[in-house]
Image (spheres, grey):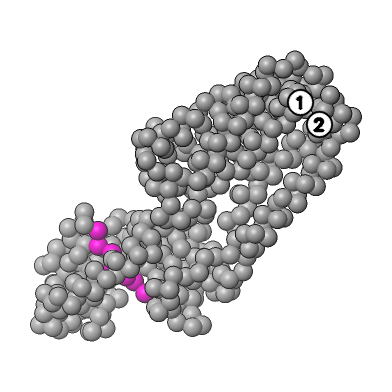
Amino acid sequence: MTRARALLALRGALCVGLAASTALAIDYRSAGSAFCGPESGCAALRQTDLAYLWGIGITLPELGLFGLAVAFALSLLRDATWGARLAVVAGAAGLGLLAVQAVALETYCWLCVTTDVASVVAGAFGIVALKQPRSADDRAPLRLAAWVALPLLSIVAPALWPSVKPAPAVPAELRGFYQPGKINVIEFADFECPFCRALHGELKSLYAPYGDRIHVVRLNVPLDRHPQAMPAALAAVCSEPSGKSAELSEFLFSTNDLSEAAIAKHAQSLGIDMTAFRSCLASPAARARVEREKALLKSIGFEGLPTTYVGSTRIVGAQAREVFRDALEAAAENSGERGVPAWAYVVIVLMLVAVTVRLGWSEEQGDAAAA
């Protein structure tokens, strides 16, 4: 194999790695799951210490993306020796990360595996290229503009996908809570969870402009590590017959005292029938309802709290205000069903790659590469 052909294969493998690394980096930073499902190996690895580097706010996919981009950039020099060397380093790192997934973590992330295998392939061709004599221009057989366009396309294509893909269908388990013609919001929350409490105030202000177009259902997911969460959830459930659930929930989200005594005192101040309220709190039926709501979130994929469905958009965590605002606007416009099918998007990207290669092909350099 000639040096030019080895470098051609090296850059192709790096482009695959760049695309997979970009997708993985976006998935780590997204509000929900941009590329991987909540039960996938990607989601499992995302929860490990390997995913985040030394507490400095950089994810492993972002570091990999940077390294592969530098390797590709160095390979575009007339003498691509340093690019090939860095590709070999990336290949060694890829082998190490594959071993960690197989031996230490015993789980696989398809995007991680794609990135690591692409790095290994690039490293292998880097070794081949380093063993061959240098040619007049290591960028054969494409012109420089095409070589610059291909990695950019590898990064931009996965980066754009979350904004153009169709929204996933609302889980069937939640459809029964939705009302036709409304902006439907399902909130899974824990009254003791600090992120749920912070988000509650933000959501109230975001709901206000929509008035009665908003239909909100709050489902209780008291976490075991929050000792006061279950009593608070039971109180919210048991206040419903009195029509005071919204007022009591406001108190539960805002108070620093979630003791049963404090809850009972506030419930009484709201005019709730305390005999019925206390009877409900002690009833198996109320606890069974809360447990069903907890199990519901688990059945559709528990990733963390708060989890909010706005129309067909799933948002995990207390994300930025803009994330919820955009989701509400999309639900109000009923645009959640729009989007580009995955197969069509892949075809479009492949066509752009083909056009880039065709326009960037240099007959003169192609002849030199084949020599």
273 horizontally vs 328: left or right: left
Q: Is residue 146 found left or right of 205 in the rendered image?
A: right
Is residue 216 covered in magenta? Answer: yes
Q: Name the N-terminal-most of marks 2 and 1.
A: 1
Whole-percent x and y of residue 127?
A: 63, 21
Residue at point 25%, 80% (across, down): 240
In-front residue for pair 339/128: 128
Front residue of 69/231: it is 69
Kindly identify the residue that appears in the image at 40 percent across and 43 percent down: 107
For the residues labelled 2 and 1, say whether their Cβ atoms are less than 8 Å apart. yes
Q: Amino acid at mark 1?
A: Ala
- Name the quadrant containing residue 245: bottom left
State the residue in front, 189 or 148: 148
Across and down, in percent, residue 49 comes to 37, 38
Magenta region, residue range? 215-223
Residue occupied by mark 1: 4
Q: Is residue 321 magenta?
A: no
Is the residue marked by circle 1 packed among few (<14), some (14-19), or many (20+) residues within 10 Å?
Answer: many
Q: Secondary structure of the magenta portion, mostly?
A: strand
What residue would you read off at disc 2? Answer: 141
User: For the point 29% across and 70% down, which residue is it?
Assistant: 293
Residues at marks 2 and 1, CA–CA distance in whole angstroms: 7 Å
Q: Circle 2 — which element?
A: loop
Where in the figure is residue 217, as x and y percent of width and height? Answer: 37, 74
Q: Is residue 42 above or below residue 286?
A: above
Mark 2 is on which residue type? Pro
| Quadrant location, the C terminus | top right
Question: Which of the 4 image quadrants contains residue 299?
Answer: bottom left
Say whether residue 234 is left or right of residue 198. Answer: left
